Amino acid sequence: MAWYAYCITEQKAFLGSARSRRPFPVDGLNGVRGSQVFAYPSGELAVIVSEYMPGELNQQAVIEHARVVSDCFRNTTVLPFRFGTVFDTDEALRRAIRSNRKAFTDSVSRLKGKAEMHLKLVVKDGSLREAMNDIELPSSVGGEYLCRLREKAARHRERQTKARALSVQVNKLFHPLQEEVSCRKNDTGGMLIDIAHLIDEKAVERYQNSYSSAARQLKNCEILISGPWPPYHFMPGKLRTPGSTNS
């Protein structure tokens, strides 16, 4: 049987001190295309899955995937799988957990009681507009190519320097446990900085209350805040998941 995977969590979140060796249904939770959601036990862990029937995974399936992960996150620590992760057989699912058991177990312990918050900073500084315009390199190699290459590198450094300076300022305002930062050009040609912060769940209200102070200090930025979310950006790296596919 093929399984569609949503996330990994602790088996005790559903059974308490009891243990199961076979998949058991998670009451009141439906997954992609309305399918029944199961907890597939593996030692202390459980993989949240539903039976997978081949077919298109559309935008509605993205929403359903996120809803299952979020519903589980309300009650326990979760390690989300990427949307579209499918294990072709029971053995493939079991091998994937065995291959990464230490990483999964350590991550559940590390992320217990933690949540992810998102910040989007739209930089309004007009002086950055030129820096956000990328340089097209000539097709032929020569003096012009090297000149454009240096200019391209200089603009990249300028963007990264500004993004780092803002992320340091934001870090001091919000005091996260960890952060992930990315920078890109937005639709209007300006700079958009995406920041994911890992925080204690008990600190969510304090974190949200820091918004007003941040808005006053970051005068050249529009700030959008959302969360708490499952820790999508703080999963363990370089996992081996034999037998899994992304549909």
Image (cartoon, helix red, strand yellow):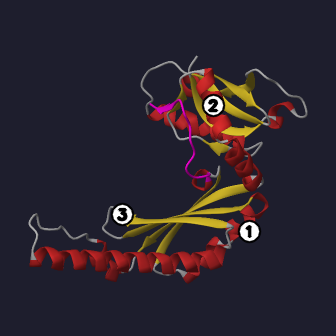
Q: Residue 223 vs residue 113: left or right?
A: left
Q: Secondary structure at mark 1?
A: helix
The answer to whether mark 2 and mark 3 are in CB contact below 8 A is no
**In the rendered image, the vertical position of residue 41 relative to residue 166, given as above or below:** above
**What amino acid is at disc 2?**
Arg
Q: Residues within 10 Å of mark 2 (few under 14, many from 20)?
A: some
**If you read the primary sequence from the N terminus, does the residue marked by circle 2 or circle 3 appear first?**
2
CA gap, disc 2 and disc 1: 41 Å
Residue 160, image x, y percentages: 41, 75
Which one is in front, 152 or 171?
Answer: 152
The residue singled out by tag 1 in the image is 206
Question: Does the magenta-highlighted stretch encompass residue 185?
Answer: no
Of the numbered discs 2 and 1, the one sitting upstream in the chain is: 2
Callout 1 environment at 10 Å: few (<14), some (14 to 19), or many (20+)? few
Side of 247 where 176 appears, left or right: right
Instruction: From this view, report whether residue 22 is shown above or below residue 144.
Output: above
x then y, percent, for residue 137: 17, 68
Residue located beneath label 3 in the image: 186
Q: Quadrant of residue 176?
A: bottom right
Q: Which residues are magenta?
A: 235-247
Q: Nearer the viewer, residue 4 or 224?
A: 4
Does the rendering let one see residue 215?
no
Visible residue check, residue 193:
yes
State the separation of the CA atoms marked 3 and 1: 29 Å
The residue wearing badge 2 is 95
- Nearer the observer, 245 or 166: 245
Secondary-structure class at tag 2: helix
Is 39 left, or right, of 231 in this rendering?
right
Among numbered discs 3 and 1, the one appearing first in the sequence: 3
Q: Disc 1 residue type?
A: Arg
